[in-house]
Each structure stands twice: as C-alpha cells, then as structure tokens.
Amino acid sequence: MIGGAVKVALVAIIVYRVARSFLNPPDDVFKKHYPGKCSQVKGLNFGSEDLEVTKNGLAFVTSGVWFPTVSNKFDEFLKSNNIQGNIFLYDFNQPDLGARKLKLIPSKDFDPETFHPHGISLLEDETNGEHLLYVVSHPKHADDAVEKFRYSPKTNELIHLKSFTGDVLHITNDLTVLEEDKFYISNFLYFKNPYLSIAEHVFSSFGFGSLVFFNGTAFSVVKQSMNSPNGLFLSKDKRILYNALPREQSVKAFEIKSDYSLTEIQSVVIGTSPDNLHLSNSGDALYTGAHPVIPKIIQHLGDPRQPSPSSVLKLPLKDGKIVPEEIVELFYDHGNLISGSSVAAVYNNKLLIGSVINKLVICDANTAL
C-alpha cells in the first residue's frame, strides 16, 4: 500500500517537472534580430561549443563535444558526419582565413583520438604568444579530464603538456583558470549512466551539481548542491567567479576568498537559459550564448538535425556585479543561421557566436556592443 503510494507520488513529480520544462513561449513570439550583418565562419560546420579570445583577437574554439549521456541520435550524428574532437583558431584580424583546425601534438598521457573538448580557458603569454590552454575533455571509456596545452604561434600547433583528473570530477562542463595549474571547474551532472542522468534532470532542483577547485595538486569541492552549473568566467581582477545556471535561467556571482572558497554575492534571473560566459576586454560586461526555448534545445540535443533558436545577451557589470536593468539581447535567430548558441564574445565591435553542435557565426555591429 505504502509502496504503491510512493510510486504514484514519484510519477506525479516526474510528470509535473517534465511538463514544467515545456512551459515556454513558442519560438514564433520572438523576432529575429541581428546587431548588423552576420555570416557563417567558413571551415567550421559541426560545433563551436566554447571559445576564448586573446587580447590581440585570436579565438580558440572547441569543437566535437561528446559526453556519456548524449542520445543515440547525437552519437549517430557525430559518426555520420565524421565529427571528431578538435580545437580551431579564428583570427578576428584575418577573418577571410576562416576557422582553422589546430594540430594536436600528443604526449604519452594524451591520445587525440579520444579527445572530446567542451569548456576552455587560457592564460595569455603576451610576450611570445605561446598561450596556455586548459580544456575540459570527455574521453570515451575514461574519466573526465582537463587537458593542458601550449600554443605554438609559429607552427599553429597545440602541444600537450599535462592531464588533470580526479574522483570528484563527474560530468564536467566548463572551467576558468585563476593562474597556472589552478582553476575552477563545473560538475554539470553527477551521474554518467544515461538512465540515472534522466532522473537527475527530472529532479535537478535537488542539486546534484557542484563547483570544484584544483589548487595545483588536488581537487576539492568548493560549492555543492547546485542545479547543473554550466559556464564559468572570472572578473578582470580575478576576485569574482561568474557561473551560468541554465536550468535556473540565472547567472550567479561568487566572491573568491583567500582560501579559494566561494561566497555568493549575487544571483540574477535573466529570463533565458545561459550556456557559456565570456568577459569583455574592458571587464565591464559579460556575454552569454543562450537557449531561449527549452523544448527546442532539448530536441536539438536529442537530435542535432532539429534546429533550436539562438540568442546572445550582454550583461553589463558595475563593481563586479551584474546590472539587471541594463541587460540587453544583442542577437536572436530561430535556428536558421545558427542553431543552439552556446557562447558569444566581442572583439573590436564584432560579435562571434558559437554553438553546441552547429555553426560558428560572426556579426558586424551597427552600434557599440
């Protein structure tokens, strides 16, 4: 009797949560708008999930994302299009070159064939241009890892230096580097089993996600019981950590303490599902690629051939905090030009937009971004 009641209650909760996730306005209530002329960047057709831009306009772009809980159709899409994990380079100063695939130079601890990059962060070397890149990877049949590379500007190669992994890493998403070999990383999902992952999605408000810090030698959880934390980025002075939470349609700001623990100082609901974050060169605004219609992005992730709308928001900052009343949407597309926007960055008043498993797009701007 009690067991039956529990089953009924569980079914009711699942139905309620699934139904609630679909209570979004239809896509056609939004009007397409661009900041200026927009076009696809040649050379990259199947995914530009995350990117980082240097001060001199080099954008390093991750492509070929995969993780253990993707659908069979997602897997089939990767295989049928021969999509592999790569990092591409786009130069804002030489746009005609398009996005160029960088050669990965392996080490004994790294096999490019198993590389499935997700989030990315970098430390700039402004003297020699030999930037350090840290990339989240989901290698098949192995634990999630952070891969460290050195970029060689003379040869356009990424030389693998080191791998970082640990028991507290589950299904990770994004990271942001504080200093060499010290970084924060988000555990987006806890369970790697597809069926348990579905249950986790349904009961996500219970908080299975977490933020983790690597101090150079070991990982430790610094914020737990979170609702699928996603994109991470640091303020210009590296005193504040910003975190996108797409399920809550919010962005949080955390003050970084001397022991690297985090204290929440702000949580802003932005009315759409933010994915990755990027900071302006001046440090006075965050940009996010967002998913405005939840049912469509769920369908898109289930089958990448199904289009999903794309949106880019600018989140102005003052004294390190987001100014909610000044948030503005810079870009909206129904999924025809770019589907499933996941990241956006601005350089010299040009807007670069990436996607989970679709195109990379560049936009001119008629007004200041």
Image (cartoon, rainbow, N blue to C red):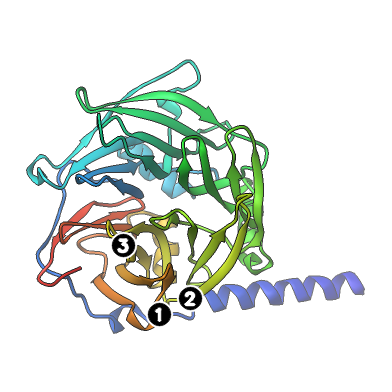
Instruction: Give the quarter of the figure containing the C terminus.
Output: bottom left
- In the visual, does 182 lie left or right of 158? right
Where is residue 5? Give x, y as percent.
84, 76
Marks 3 and 2, how far apart in space?
28 Å
Which residue matches tag 1? 324
Whether residue 368 is visible, yes or no, is yes
Q: Quadrant of the N terminus?
A: bottom right
Residue 47 appears in the picture as rendered: no
Q: Residue at point 42% right, 76% down?
A: 270
Question: Label 3 sits on what residue type?
Answer: Pro
Residue drawn 42% across and 48% down? 74
* N-term-proximal mark, 1 vs 2: 2
Which label number is shown at residue 268? 2
Identify which amino acid the numbered label 2 is placed on.
Val
> Which element type, helix, strand or loop, lies under badge 1?
helix
Residue sitting at x 59%, y 39%:
215
Place residue 354 in its image quadrant. bottom left
Residue count near mark 2 (Cα–Cα under 10 Å), binned few <14, some 14–19, many ≥20: some
- Residue type highlighted by circle 1: Pro
The residue carrying mark 3 is 307
Count neighbours of disc 3 (C-alpha within 10 A) and say few if under 14, some if 14 to 19, many if 20 or more: many
SS label for mark 3: loop
Q: Could you tell me residue 285's position as x and y percent?
A: 33, 66
Quarter where residue 256 is shown:
bottom right
Q: Who's the residue at 52% across and 68% down the image?
A: 247
Measured Cα–Cα span from mark 1 to mark 2: 7 Å
Q: Are marks 1 and 2 in contact (CB under 8 Å)?
A: yes
Task: Give coordinates of residue 203: x percent, y percent.
Answer: 66, 66
Residue 135 in the image: above or below residue 275:
above
Instruction: Name the side, left or right, on which 286 lies relative to 146.
Output: left
Give x and y (percent) for residue 16.
63, 78
